[in-house]
Amino acid sequence: MSQAEKHAERKDVYGDYATLTIPESETKSTLNIFMIYMGVLAVVAAIFAGSGLAQMYDAATMLEVALLGNIILAIFGGLIAYIGGSTRANTYMILRYPLGRIGSIIGNLIVSAIPLIVWFAVETWLFGITVNVIYPHNVLTSIAAASLWGGFLMMITAYYGFRAMAILSYITVPFWYTLVVIGFFASIDLAGGFSKVWTVRPEVIAPLGAGITYVVGVYASGSVITSDVARYGRKPWSGAVAWATHVTIFMTALLFAGGVMTLLTKTPNVIVAIAQIGLGVGALLLAILGQWTTNDNNVWSAALAWINTTGKLNKKAWVLILGTIGTLIAGVWAGLWGMSLDPFIQFASLLGYFIPPVGAVLIADFYIFRPYVLGLKDIKTRYKFGPGTKYAAINIPGLTATLLGGIIAWLSGVYGLGTPVVNGVLSAFFLYLLIAIPMAKAGIKWEVGEWIEKETGF
């Protein structure tokens, strides 16, 4: 019996192959993968993130910081996406190797299971702010109320899965980016022309390292979970190319657009700029569709993480549970902070410290330790999955390097030492190799315990 036939016999118990590798029949084109990533990026939060940069830099420096941060994300996320495309496995399955099966549960909690619930809440909160700005005098459009009904709206495509999210992205992405361009040039026109862009600046300019960490933090979780989408790629490189292209070019453009609009108009919201030139309906559609294509992916990936953490319930049940929790958080958030960007900026920076080290350990394990120390040169042999596959319970170097990398990044931020996110990633990367290689060479067990994969993939 062929591998494909064996795969077909395995029942997808949890939905969307949450614990199984993707069969050939379910793979998608590079364009399809690109459009999913672009749908994730088509979000008001990207504009708000640019507004955060505008509080730290002038336009030229802002563009430099955005580009440098996104190049880091392109390389980092692209390497991880290639692992997903090669193995056809999601992030939470892949982490079983560099962290161990129990360690991967800890990694799931750090990377997705908890942060993506909060991200869902953040995006839903921003949706509530946008609706309230456009239609301020109605009980259903208060920030809290709009956050609540908007959050439930955004669960729909995640509930139905990858295909539904892809369809929504194809419909939404061209329209969304067109409206962003309109809002960008409208704000420049209202401010008196493009020459104004390079003359305005905030009162205090922040260090470059702080801005780069902030940019990476905005998309840190997304860069580490690129495999969730990339595993569907028809070619192993589909996800890597799609990710690197969308983040380097389009994420940089969105951050710059949001920052420029804030510097020129003092209005940290592209939707407000569009509403100011009489396109209120278009602005509302931008809010709804933009948040929807991102937030469905957030709760979908979080559901995959919780399935791999608990082995309980299916994807649809987890989408409803996590989406409800995130929506309620957004409602409370709206009541406490209203329109303040401070919690958003703090949260993005915190992610920039602790999530990237997980990806750094994964990259070190897959690209260096296994091929050059364990001799697994064939990519297909490095990470295997299927019933009866044995995983270590804990990978000692992996967990140690992950936690220390996060702490080093955080301390770098606290004491202003270099670029925190880079410090964290490099520390985790080299610590893993410095611990794992000597242990392997000396015959010391670097993995402890054993976990055997079941027929369900858990």
Image (cartoon, rainbow, N blue to C red):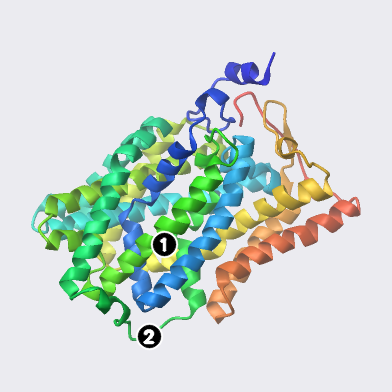
Task: Identify whether 31 is placed above or below 411.
Answer: above
Residue at image position (37%, 36%) is 165
Where is residue 282 shown, x and y percent of the image? Answer: 17, 50
Task: Identify whether 317 is placed above or below 192.
Answer: above
Tell me the number on the disc at residue 252: 1
Q: SS class of the residue under badge 2?
A: loop
Residue at image position (32%, 69%) is 259
Q: Is residue 129 visible?
A: no
Q: Amino acid at mark 2?
A: Val
Left or right: residue 316 compared with residue 441: left
Eye-nearest disc, 1 or 2: 1
Where is residue 96 shown, x and y percent of the image? Answer: 66, 42
Residue farthest bottom in this picture: 203
- Residue 49 figure quarter: bottom left
Q: Is residue 28 visible?
A: yes
Q: SS class of the residue under badge 1?
A: helix
Where is residue 406 shown, x and y percent of the image? Answer: 60, 64
Q: Give whichever of discs 1 and 2 has the lower sequence position.
A: 2
- Residue 46 figure quarter: bottom left
